[in-house]
Image (cartoon, coloured by chain):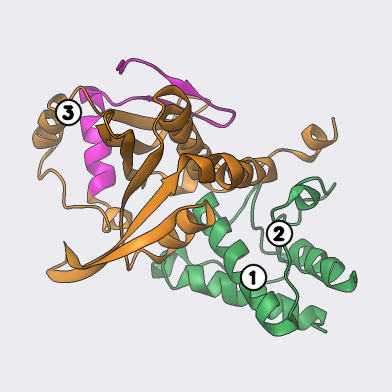
Amino acid sequence: MLDKNSVQEIIFQALNNINDERGPDEQIELGPETRLFGTDAALDSLSLVSVVVDVEEAVSGVSGRQISLTNDRAMSQTVSPFSDVSTLTNYILLLLSEA
Amino acid sequence: MTHDQVLSGEFVNLRPLQVADAELTFRWRRAHRARYLNEGAATIQAQAAWIAGRSASEFNFIIELKDGRPVGMLSLINIDMANRHGEPGRFLIGEEASVKGLPVAVEAMKLLYELAFDRLGLVRVCGIVAANNHLMVKWQKFMGMKEEGRLRNHLRQDGHYHDAVYLGLLVQEYRTATLQRMKAMIAVARPVTEKNS
C-alpha cells in the first residue's frame, strides 16, 4: 500500500517532468501547498493533463491498482482534487483505501 | 465555408485570425515556446502577408479569454470534404501566464472539434506533432488521439532533424471518449459553488 509520502513523491515526480520541459525561470516550486489548478495555479491545462497521466501511470505501476483522476466523482468533489499537491495526495489515498 | 464566425465557449472564444493580429502572433511565433512549430514569418510584415494569404478553405482562429484577451491560436486546415477529414494545427498558447488554472487549451480544441465533427461533418482529424514535444503528444493521446505512425527525421528544429508522430482521431472516438474527457477537464476549473449549484 502506498503511504502519504510515497504518493506525494509520485506527484512531485510528475511536476518534475513538467519542469524538465520548462526554462530555469519557469520552474514549479515543489511542496504540499503547491497550487495545481484553479486560482493562483502553477499549471495550465496542458501541464495538468501531463500530471494526471504521469500520476495515474505511476500509482498503477507501484500499487497494481488502476485509478482515474478525471472521472465524474473527481470532478464533483467539494474541494477539487487538483487544488494543490496536498488535496491530490489525499484524494489518491482515498481511492486506494477503497476496495 | 464561412470564416467570420466566432466559436463561443465557457472559458474561451475562438474568433477569426485577422491581419491586425500580425504583430501579436509574430511575437508568439518567435517565442521559445513555439519552437516545435515550423519557423514561420521572419518579420511582422511577412506575418501580415501570410495571414492575408490564408486560403478560404482554412479556419484560422485566435483563442481569446471571455474578457477578450487574446492568448493563443489554433487552426483547422487541409480540410478534405470529399474524404471528410481535416487537420487541427498551428496550436500555440502565446500567453502562458494568462492561462494558468484555466482549461484554455482543452476548451479551444473542444470548440475546434465541434466545428470539425458536428458542423462540417468530418469523420476524422489527423496531423503531426514533433516527437520531442512530449507534453503535446501526451496531451493529444489523453484526449483520444491515436498514434498512427512515426515520420523519421521529418522536422528540422535548430539545425537538427527530429521525428514526428502522426496522430489521428475518428468521430466515433471523439463522441465516446474525447468529449467526456474534455468536459471533465473543463469541469476541474469551475468554482466549487458552481459545481454544487
- Horizontal side of residue B89 vs A37, given as left or right: left
Whether A85 is drawn above or below A76: the answer is below
Q: Is residue A30 visible?
A: no
- Chain letter corresponding to the colour orange: B
- Are the residues under marks 1 and 3 on the same chain? no
In whole angstroms, how far apart are the C-alphas of marks 2 and 3? 41 Å
In the rendered image, residue B13, in percent from the top left (x then y), is placed at 47, 27
User: Which residue position is annotated with label 1?
Assistant: A55
Disc sitting over residue A69 in the figure: 2
* Chain part drawn in magenta: B1-29
Instruction: Give the secondary structure at mark 3.
Output: loop
Q: What residue do we see at 26% from left, 33% from top? A: B80
Whole-percent x, y for residue B77 in the image:
27, 35
Which secondary structure lies at badge 2?
loop
Q: Which residue is mark 3?
A: B54
Q: Numbered disc 2: what chain?
A: A
Q: Which shade is chain A?
A: green
Q: Please give the name of the residue rendered at 19% of the width and 52% of the height, measured from the top-left corner.
A: B38
